[in-house]
C-alpha cells in the first residue's frame, strides 16, 4: 500500500509524456500485486460471504475487464488467455454473457494463483502493445477505456483489502495481514461548522476522470446547515452503546431494528467483547479498541441511530460535497486497515474528510438530474444499482489515494457493515 | 365505496358545527363496515402473504388505534374491551409494547367477526362520549389525535380492499367482491406538457390535516421538465412486453432483473394469459384485459424498465407535486377496484392525476429537509420506514376520495406489486 | 366425540343387515360434523403451519375422497358438486391430477362452511343412492372402497382435533374447544414385563379392514425383551428435564441435538413455564400440568433421548404388536384431548396400550416383507411415504375407538411434536 | 490410490511383528498424502457444499483424531501442535468441545497446507513414540484406539476423493485429478440368484476390526429371495430415463418426487447432456458415458424408483450381507474414480459385490438388536446418526481395499448423490 499512498494525484489527461498512460497502467497493475505480497497461496481463493470475493478473483476479474472491453475489440490478433475466463471472471455484465454465480466464487481452485498471474502477464503484454506510443487508430477510445479499467482496478484494490479483512476475521486463528503501527493520538474536539447553503452545485467538474454516476453536474437548493468538523470516534460510539443504544427502538429505522431483534448485529463489525474491554479485529490482527480512532464498520442503520441519539442527522451528499470540494487531498493520508485521527489533515476547520472512513450520507443512491445510463455493457457499471442503496463519501484508509475525489459516490446497502464505513454528523442551522 | 366517493373533501378544522368531528368519525367508521358488506364471515380472517392483513384485522386494528392513543389516555374510567387486544392488534408500535407477529395475523380465528364488531361498538361508544360537545379539558389534543385516527382508518379502508383482492386472487374459485361496471373508453392521446421548474415548493401547506412526512414545506431546485398528460395504459404496457421487455437486462435495475431470473414476476400482478389474449383479475372477478385502462399492479422495477424502454424516466415527487398542486380533486373519480381512463377529469392538460392508480416516482422515500421524527409512539407512524422504499403519488381507485391530496406521500418497496400502482412518465425538457 | 367413543368395534364384513354399510357411513359422516359443533365459523379456515389443515378442509377433503374414488367412477349420471374442488381438495394424489399447494390451505375463504356442508350433503346423497340395498353391479368394489373412505374419514377426525389444538394454541386468547373434566388419578407403578420373543408374527390377520401397509402378515425373529407396563408420565418426563436432559448431547440423536441448539424445541409442545410450575395447553384450555398423566406431544428425538437417559430403549413395532395383539380394546377409553392414566384398562399387566397416546417405536416406517404398492391412485395412500418417518402404535385420546387396532401403523417424522404422541419404554431381557 | 489397492487385507491382530501396528499406521498416513499428490495448493481449501470438506480439512481432522483421543490422554508431555486446532478440526464430537461450523470449513485459508503437513508430522512423531515396541502401560487401549484412528483415516481417504470430485465438478474448467484408463468391457448378463433365507446371522464376527454399528451379530428371519448377479449399468439406467422415469410419480417416494418437481435432480449426479449423447464427469475429467459401466451417483430415491420401474426391489442389508459373507475380496478391484464392469471378480455367480459402487439397501440405518451406544466421545462415532439415513453396502472404487468387508455399514441420506452409490436389485422368491 505504501507505494500507492506516496503517489500524487494523477492527471489522466496529461499527454505531454507519450507513455504516461502505459506507465500509469503498469503502476496500478503492480500495486494490485504488491497488495498481495503478504498473502499465502491459500489466502487467494477464500470467499466468506456472497459480498466477499477471493483475492484471486479480484486479480483475474480486473484483467478480464481489460481483455473484454479493450484487448478483444481493439488488439488485432489478440487471443483470449482462456475462453472459459469470459464466464468465470465476468462480475455482472449481463450484456457480455453468462457469468459464474457470485456466491460460488470461492469454489474455484483453478485457475491457480500462478495461472492467474500468467493471465495478468498475458493481458499486460497486450495492453503494452496497444498503448505503446499511442499510434492505434482508435487510440482515443482505447485511452478512455484504459482509464476506466485503471480506476476499476483501483476500486478492486480497495475491495481486495476489505474482503481480506472479512476472510481473516472468520478464522479462529485471526491471521495478520501486516503489522500495523499503533499511532494512538487524542481525537480533536468535535464542533459543527456553519455552511450557507443556497443554490449549490454538485457533481464532477473538469476533464479529469470520473464515473458516469458523478454527472451531470447540477444545481440543488440547500438550506443553511452545519457539518461536523470530524468523524465520530470509537469512544463516542461506545457511549451510545453503553446508554443502551441497541435496545431503544425509537432510535432505529424499522428494518434495522428488526435485524437487531433477529440478532444480526449488536455492535460494529469486528468488535469483540473481552471481559471489561473491547477488542477490534484489524488487518494487523486483534487489538484493543482505540477510543480516539474513527468508529468504522458501522452500517447505515447504526449511523442513522447514532445520529438520532446524538440529536443530529446525517448529511446529504450535496451538503458533504459542497464542503469537501474545498478541501485538499493530501498524499499519504492512509494506512491500510488501521485508523487514527488525522489531526494533521485539518483544513477550513474540517478534518478526516478523505481517506479515513467512508462516510454514510442520508442520500439514497439515485441518478443525478439529467443522468442517462450509457448504452453498451459499460452502461451497467453504475446505473443499474441505483436502488435500495445509500451514498457514502470521502474514501477510507484502504482506498488508493489517487482514487479519492470530492465528487466520488460510493454506495452500499444499509445493512452492510463490512466496508470501512463511519459517521460524520450534520445538523440544520438554527 | 359509493358513499365515500360521493363525499366532498372534508375540512377537519371546520368547527362551526360543534359535533362535526364526531359526525366525521361516525361516517368513516361506518364506511369501513360498509366496505365489508359483500364479505362472507370466512373472508374476514385470511392472510395470503405477510404484507396482507385479514379484513378482520383491519377492522380491529383501527379500533385499537383509537383505544390506545385516545380512549386509554383521555377517557376517564375507560375499560379496555379485552386487554389481550393490545398485543393482537398493535401493528408495529414498538413503544406501545409487544405485538403479534405480522405473518401470523391469519392464525387468529378468535376474536370472531361478531366480537370484533362488538369491539368497534365499544370503542365508538367511548369516542362518542369523548368527542361529544368538545368539553373535555384536553379536547384540542383529542381533536388532533382523532383526526389522525380517522385518516389512519381511511388508509386501512384502502388496504382492506387491496388485501382482499390479493386474498381472492389466490383462490382458484376467483370470488367476486362486487360486480363492477365495464366502462370501456378509448384512452386519450398521450403528450408531454412542459413545466418551467426553478425554485419550487414541496410539502403540505395550510392547516388542514396532513401526515408528518409531508412536512416541512420546503424549496428545491428543478430544471425544466415535461410530465406526461396521463398514465400508461394496459395496451401500451403490453407493447413493452411483446417487444421482449422482460428479457432485456439493459432495461432493468439489477435487483429487478435478478428477481425476473428467479421467476418472481413476469407481468403485472393479476394478469393471466389465456391462449392468445390476456385476462386480469379484478374485484369484479376475472375479465378480459382492457387495453385502454391504466396499467396497474406494476412494481417499481417494472415502472422503471418501462420508462427506460420508452426513452423517458419517472418523475421526482417534487416534479409531480408541482403539477398536482394545481389540479382540482373531483368527487366520484373512483370505482373501487376497476380502472378506466378518466378523460373527464382533464385539467391544465393533465388527466388521471388523482384516484386512478398510485404513480411511482423515482424518489426514494426520505425525510424532507428539516423533518424530525416526533417524540412518542405516534412518531413511529412514518419516520422509521424511510429506508429502501419509493414514493408513490396521487391515490388510486380504492383510496377514499377525501383521503387524497397533492402533498400525500405513499411509499412501498420496489418489488411490491399488490398495490394499485401504475406509471406516469416524465422527461427532461430539451 | 362422546358418540364415537361409545361405539363398539365395528365389523365391516357383517352383511346380515343389508344397509349396515350405509348406516356406518352415515354414522361416521355425522361424527365428523359433531366434532365441529363447538367451532365458530371463523375457526374452520385457519392453517397455522404446513402440517396443519383447516377444519373446513378436512370436511371437504373427506367428501372429495368419496366423490373421486367412488361416485365419479360408479354412480351413473353423478355430477361433481364443483369441478374446481377436484383440485382444491385433493391432498396428494399425483395420479388424480394437480392439487392446491398444502401450505396454502389456509388461503381459501371460499367455499364457505355452508357450501362445504352442502358439498357433504351432495356427496352423502350420492353415496346413499349407491350403497342402498347393495344392488349395484360393482357393489363389491364399491363396498371395499367405501370402507376405505370411512376409515379415511376417521383418520381425518383425529387430524381435525390434532390440528385444531395447534390452531388454538397459536392464539394468545387460548380458546377452549370444550370444557374437559379434570380426572386426576395417581399413575400406576411402572414395571417391565418379560416377553419370550422368538419367531413371531406381525401384521394384519383376518378379513376385517386394515390398510395396505399392515400387510402382509409375516414372521420375524425377536430376542427376549421386556416392555413397560404403562407409558411415561409428565412427572417422569419432568425429572428428565430437571436433570438437564435438553443440555446433554450424549442423549440425543444428532439431528435432534442440532434442532435443540437452533432453539426449535426445548420441552414437549404446548408446555409453558409459569414461574415455578408448568402449564399445558389442552383442548380444554390452559391447565396446570398433571404429573400423573401420560407425557404427550413429544417428538421421536425426545422419546429416544428420554429412553437413553432412563437406560432403556424404545420398542420395535414387532415387539409392541406382539403384546398388543393380546390386549382387548375397551370402549370409551378416550376423552378427546385430555389425558389421564388408564388404570382401569389394565390387562396382562399392561395398561394404556390403546387410546391414550400414540407410542413412538424405534422402527423406521418401511414396507413389510412382501409388500407391493397397489396399482392406481389409491396405491399412493401409504407406500410413497415409507421414507424418513417412524412408526407409532396404539392410538391416542383423539383417535376414534373403532379405528384402533393392534396392527395399525401410524407414522410421522422424527421432529413432529403436534401429534398426540408419547413414550413407552422397552429393554432387552437379561 | 495404486499403492493402496495393491495392499492385501490387513489383519490388525497380527502381533507377531512388534511394530506391525506402527507400520500400518505409517502406511495409511502415507496413503492419505499420496492421494493428494496430484493436487495444487489451491485445491486443498475448497468446500462446494456443506457435505463436502476441503482436502486440507481431511488431512488435519484425521490428525486431530489421533491427537485428541490418543496423544493427549496417553503420551506424556505431549504438546498440542496448536490449541486452536482442537476447535477447527473437531468434526462433530460434542463431548470434546465446541467445533467450527461445518458449512464454514472452506473459510479457512490458514493453517496453510505446509502447516497442516507439519501438524501431520508432529502427530506422527508422537504416535511413533507411543506405538514403538508396545511398551506403554496402556498399550492395549492405545492399540485399540490406533486401529480405530487408522480406519477413521481410511474413511476420510474415500471422502477426500468423493469430495474432490464434487469440487472439481463445480468448476467450469473441469480439472482432471488423474488420467484414468478407459477399459470398456461389455456388461455381463444380469440374472437373479436364489437364496434360501431362513434364520440368518448378520453382523461382524471374529476379532478383526469392525465399527460398533456392525455389532452385535444377531439372528433375523428372512423369506427366500433372489439377489441380482451384478449392479445396474448406465445403459440400463438410461433406458429408465428414456421411458420417462423422472416424470412418473407412481414410481417415486413422495419426498423424492417433490424434489424432482422442485428441480433438485433429474439424472445421476455428474451426468451432462451433450446434444444426442450423455457425458459424465469423472476424476479423469469429462467422458462419454460408458453404457456398460455401473450407474453411479444415484440417490436412494433414484435407486428405489428404478427398482419400482423394473418390477423389483432393493435388498435388505441382511439379505445382502448373507450373500456377501460368502464372497472373497480380491485385491486391486478398484480404480479410483472410474468404473467398469468387473466380470473377473465373479464368484458363486455374483460379481461386483465389493469395490465398484456402494449399493443402496432398503434398510433404514438403525441400531442392531442389542446395540448400545458406547460411553464417551467415541460413542458419537455412529450411534447418533441412526435417524433418517439408509444403509449402503460393498464399498466403491474409491474405498481402500482393506477397508471393505461384508459387515461394513455405510449410511447416507436418501437425497445424497455425491457418494459413489449404485443399485443392485433383489426380488422375493416365487
Image (cartoon, coloured by chain):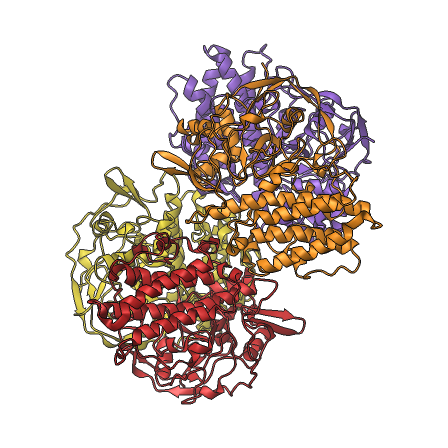
Chain colours: A red, B yellow, C purple, D orange
Task: Give the position of the N terminus of chain D as an image quadrant.
Answer: top right
Residue with the most extreme front position: D17
Where is residue B278 drawn, in percent x and y?
Answer: 26, 42
Residue with the most extreme right position: D137
Q: Quadrant of residue C125?
A: top left
- Please name the residue shown 53% across and 56% down the image: D41
Whether residue B25 is visible, yes or no, is no
- Number of labels in the image equals 0
Where is residue A198 drawn, in percent x and y?
Answer: 30, 83
Q: Is residue C174 left or right of residue B342?
A: right
Task: Give the position of the C terminus of chain D as an image quadrant.
Answer: top right
> In this rendering, is residue D156 above or below A183?
above
> In this rendering, is residue A168 above or below D15?
below
Where is residue A365 drawn, in percent x and y?
Answer: 36, 68
Viewer-closest of B294 and C222: C222
Viewer-closest of A74 and A396: A74
Whether residue C12 is visible, yes or no, is yes
Where is residue A235 drawn, in percent x and y?
Answer: 57, 79
> In this rendering, is residue C285 above or below A159?
above
Viewer-closest of C137 and C181: C137
Residue with the most extreme bottom position: A348
Q: Is residue A162 left or right of residue C307?
A: left
- Please name the residue shown 50% across and 46% down the image: D177
> In this rendering, is residue B206 above or below A108?
below
Q: Quadrant of residue D216?
A: top right
Amino acid at each position: 500500500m505504501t507505494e500507492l499512498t506516496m503517489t500524487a494525484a494523477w492527471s489522466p489527461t496529461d499527454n505531454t509524456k507519450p507513455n504516461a498512460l502505459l506507465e500509469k497502467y503498469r503502476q496500478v497493475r503492480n500495486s494490485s500485486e504488491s497488495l498481495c505480497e503478504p498473502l499465502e497461496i491459500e489466502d487467494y481463493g477464500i470467499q466468506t460471504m456472497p459480498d466477499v470475493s477471493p483475492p484471486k478473483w479480484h486479480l483475474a476479474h480486473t484483467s478480464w475487464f481489460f481483455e473484454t472491453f479493450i484487448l478483444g475489440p481493439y488488439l488485432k490478433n489478440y487471443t483470449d488467455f482462456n475462453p472459459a475466463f469470459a464466464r468465470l471472471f465476468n462480475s455482472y455484465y449481463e450484456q457480455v454473457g453468462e457469468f459464474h454465480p457470485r456466491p460460488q466464487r470461492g469454489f474455484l481452485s483453478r485457475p491457480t494463483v500462478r495461472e492467474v498471474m500468467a493471465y495478468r502477464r498475458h493481458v499486460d503484454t497486450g495492453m503494452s502493445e496497444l498503448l505503446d506510443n499511442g499510434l492505434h487508430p482508435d487510440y482515443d477510445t482505447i485511452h478512455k477505456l484504459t482509464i476506466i479499467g485503471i480506476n476499476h482496478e483501483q476500486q478492486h484494490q480497495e475491495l481486495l483489502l476489505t474482503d481480506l479483512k472479512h476472510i481473516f476475521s472468520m478464522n479462529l486463528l485471526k491471521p495478520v495481514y501486516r503489522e500495523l503501527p499503533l499511532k494512538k493520538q487524542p481525537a480533536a474536539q468535535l464542533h459543527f461548522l456553519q455552511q450557507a447553503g443556497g443554490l449549490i452545485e454538485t457533481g464532477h467538474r473538469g476533464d479529469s476522470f470520473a464515473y458516469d454516476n458523478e454527472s451531470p453536474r447540477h444545481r440543488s437548493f440547500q438550506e443553511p446547515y452545519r457539518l461536523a468538523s470530524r468523524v465520530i470516534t470509537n469512544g463516542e460510539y461506545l457511549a451510545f452503546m453503553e446508554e443502551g443504544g441497541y435496545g431503544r427502538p425509537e432510535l432505529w429505522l424499522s428494518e434495522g431494528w428488526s435485524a437487531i431483534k433477529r440478532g444480526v448485529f449488536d455492535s460494529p463489525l469486528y468488535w469483540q467483547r473481552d471481559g471489561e474491554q473491547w477488542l477490534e479485529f484489524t488487518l494487523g490482527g486483534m487489538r484493543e479498541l482505540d477510543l480516539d480512532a474513527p468508529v468504522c464498520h458501522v452500517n447505515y442503520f447504526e449511523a442513522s441511530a447514532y445520529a438520532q441519539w446524538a440529536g443530529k442527522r446525517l448529511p446529504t451528499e450535496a451538503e458533504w460535497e459542497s464542503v469537501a470540494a474545498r478541501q485538499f487531498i493530501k498524499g499519504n493520508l492512509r494506512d491500510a486497515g488501521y485508523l487514527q485521527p488525522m489531526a494533521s489533515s485539518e483544513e477550513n476547520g474540517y478534518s478526516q474528510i478523505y481517506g479515513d472512513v467512508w462516510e454514510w450520507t442520508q442520500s439514497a443512491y439515485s441518478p443525478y438530474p439529467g443522468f442517462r445510463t450509457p448504452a453498451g455493457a459499460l452502461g451497467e457499471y453504475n446505473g443499474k444499482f441505483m436502488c435500495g442503496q445509500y451514498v457514502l463519501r470521502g474514501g477510507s484508509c484502504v482506498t488508493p489515494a489517487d482514487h479519492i475525489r470530492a465528487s466520488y459516490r460510493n454506495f452500499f446497502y444499509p445493512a452492510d457493515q463490512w466496508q470501512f464505513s463511519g459517521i460524520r454528523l450534520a445538523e440544520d442551522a438554527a
